[in-house]
Amino acid sequence: MHPILAARGRLALYLTAWMAMAALCVSILALAGVVGWVEGAAVLGPVYFVYSFACLSTWYLCRAFPLGVARLSILVVALAAAPAALSALCVAILSAHAAFAARWFPGVDERLAHAGPALFGGGFFLALLAIALHYVVLAFEASREAEKREAVARLAARDAELRALKAQVNPHFLFNSLHSISALTSIDPAEARQMCILLADFLRLTLAVGDKTSIRLGEELALARNYLAVEKIRFRARLRVEEDLAPECDNFVVPPLLLQPLVENAVRHGVATLSEGAFVRISARCASGALRLVVENNFDPEAPPRRSGGLGLKNVRERLRARHGAQARLDAAPRGGVFRAALELPAETEEPSK
């Protein structure tokens, strides 16, 4: 359907503009002494009303000959022939209507016949205006479609990036977990087997959220607890887990396995460097539309640095950037023997998407 006819508001605005053009034409003819005000309005008003709908046909001409695509010679011919044909139609309708109106306004048909060339020129100009309007509408629609395609492309690229980043988490986690099991086998094979069982349970849980883009914070914390239960077997009393969680934060949603790299880093670079008194503390607060998550651990500042490419922190930062842009951030830095990784992201409560 024609875009102007598709909405009542647009049609009303379009007809109002045409009636203003009709009033202008009546004023010019009346001031020139060709017709009186009343007879001019009675004759030209209905004709311009009909002509306004005739000019809507130029929409299909504009679609058939888009600017920048159609050959210039064909475009010039089309844009000259169509207004000329429409203007000739307008003058013919005007002549017929003037002959009919002569019953009430004697001589109006003859007077308007003398103004035929001027009326033809006016109709030609109005048809050109209609064509220009339609090209503007087409350009606007093309721009809007381009924006939609760009938005879809950005969304697809973001989703692909998120999937790729999330795919990095499991191999990274498996490497750290298998390293822990390997270290335990030489110390206590029985507990190494138990650790394998807990690890299998944890992986089963991670597979359950693998296809989701969001899970509730309560589920994410449960995953972190399961991982720490695996590591607790290895470090026994050396690892102390502390939680400071606001209950109202549980139903906010976060990307799955967002805390996992931070908790892994806390164990590998913190707990593993201390012979006793090691802790991993997880905090959660929500206020002013923001969810704040903090993972802290103590560490030995004098311990030799472990080889690491910083994949965990980099992964979390890139996932936050891809999903939330500048609305989310991760700050991570040591302070006084405690390493603190603080996440801040929008507090969202929608149902997890699958």
Image (cartoon, helix red, strand yellow):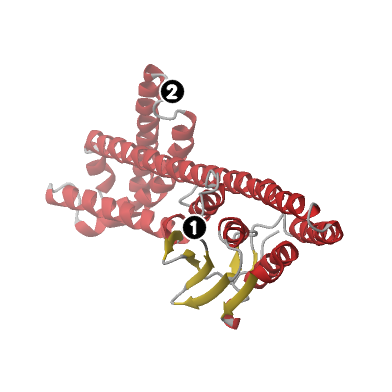
- Can residue 351 be seen in the rendering of this structure? no
Please name the amino acid that badge 1 sits on: His
* SS under mark 1: helix
The local crowd at label 2, few if under 14, some if 14 to 19, many if 20 or more residues have their Cα within 10 Å, is: few
The local crowd at label 1, few if under 14, some if 14 to 19, many if 20 or more residues have their Cα within 10 Å, is: few
Determine which quarter of the picture holds residue 156. top right
Horizontal and vertical percent position of residue 320:
51, 56
Is 321 located above or below residue 149 in the figure?
below
Residue pictured at 56% horizontal, 60% vertical: 270
Q: In this figure, what is the number of numbered marks?
A: 2
Residue pictured at 40% horizontal, 40% vertical: 139
Kindly identify which residue carries mark 2: 70
User: Which comes before the other along the chain, label 2 or label 1?
Assistant: 2
Horizontal and vertical percent position of residue 137:
41, 44
Determine which quarter of the picture holds residue 93. top left
Horizontal and vertical percent position of residue 236:
72, 68
Tell me how far mark 2 sits from mark 1, CA to CA: 43 Å
Nearest the camera: 158 or 80? 158
Please name the amino acid that badge 2 sits on: Ala
Circle 2 or circle 1, nearest the eye: 1
Nearest the camera: 280 or 322? 280
Nearest the camera: 247 or 96? 247
| Left or right side of 212 for 281 | left
Nearest the camera: 205 or 193? 193
| Left or right side of 303 for 32 | left
Kindly identify which residue carries mark 1: 324
